[in-house]
Image (cartoon, rainbow, N blue to C red):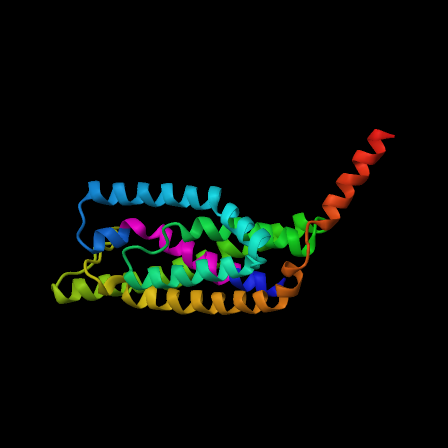
Amino acid sequence: MLIIFIATLFGLGSSFTATDNLGQIQEALGYRPQAINTFVSLHSIWNFFGRIFSRFPSEILLMKYKIPRPLMLTLALILASFGYLFIVFPSLVTLGLQLPLCVTIISKLFRLKHYVLLLNFSQLMSPLASYILNVKITGALYDKEAMKELARLGLQRIKGQPLTCIGTQCYKLSFTILTAVTLFAALGSLVLVMRTLKFYRSDIYKKFRDNAEEVVKAEEK
């Protein structure tokens, strides 16, 4: 479970951080407000499709080829880390992939006895990581670059006025850090793949089929 927490803490935290800063990223790169709104809307659409349809390919790959679900999570994290390197396209569908996969992995590995507790604890990692990565790291580095830009222009910050940074340097270091922590989460997820490989290659639905058959036989009697 600790490995899932690490993947959630760093993987989802990085994705939420990137998502929260989409508008400012576009602004820093000089896009018009209309283009910014369009891009954010497209991101939300892809996020929706990721959440809805991510379970279907993972279920097909599991049933047909016995490919573990944690491997799908690992691939989503690696895809996200490559996206961070482009800065402009930070997460797209990968955020939508990570959320349902984490939920499904927890339910399959730990069953339903402590599912609610483990799920809530896992989801607690996301806002915690988002706060650390978004506010303490990305936000602080953005403000630092914005202050440097004001200094180069010979201006001083007016109290209460929000800082605005223009240029690729605004998020360069931030997304380098996000890439590193996401790759770390992917590495942790890969460890989970190795540890659960035997479990996923077994017939994980056998118990449910047996229970269903017993119910059918009982009804026939």
Q: Is residue 172 left or right of residue 129?
A: left
- Work out which quarter of the rendered image holds the C terminus and state it: top right
Looking at the rendering, the stretch of residues picked out in magenta corresponds to 8-23
Q: Residue at point 69% right, 49% down?
A: 205
The answer, for residue 74, to whether it is visible in the render is: yes
Residue 200 versus residue 48 in the image, above or below: below
Q: Which residue in the rendered view is the most extreme toward the top?
A: 220
On screen, residue 184 above or below 139: below
Is residue 108 shown left or right of residue 133? right
State the residue in front, 67 or 181: 67
Q: Residue 1: x percent and y percent?
A: 63, 62
Instruction: Residue 139: say if magenta.
Output: no
Task: Note whether 210 is above or below 152 in the view shown.
Answer: above
- Looking at the picture, how far across and down is residue 91, in whole percent? 37, 54
Q: Is residue 14 magenta?
A: yes
How many numbered discs sit on the rendered protein? 0
Residue sitting at 39 percent across and 60 percent down?
79
Q: Where does the image place residue 54, in percent across and percent down from the top left?
A: 48, 47
Q: Quadrant of residue 213?
A: top right
Nearer to us in this view, 158 or 129: 129
Front one among 201 and 41: 201
Q: Residue 191: where, in percent of width, then height?
A: 56, 69
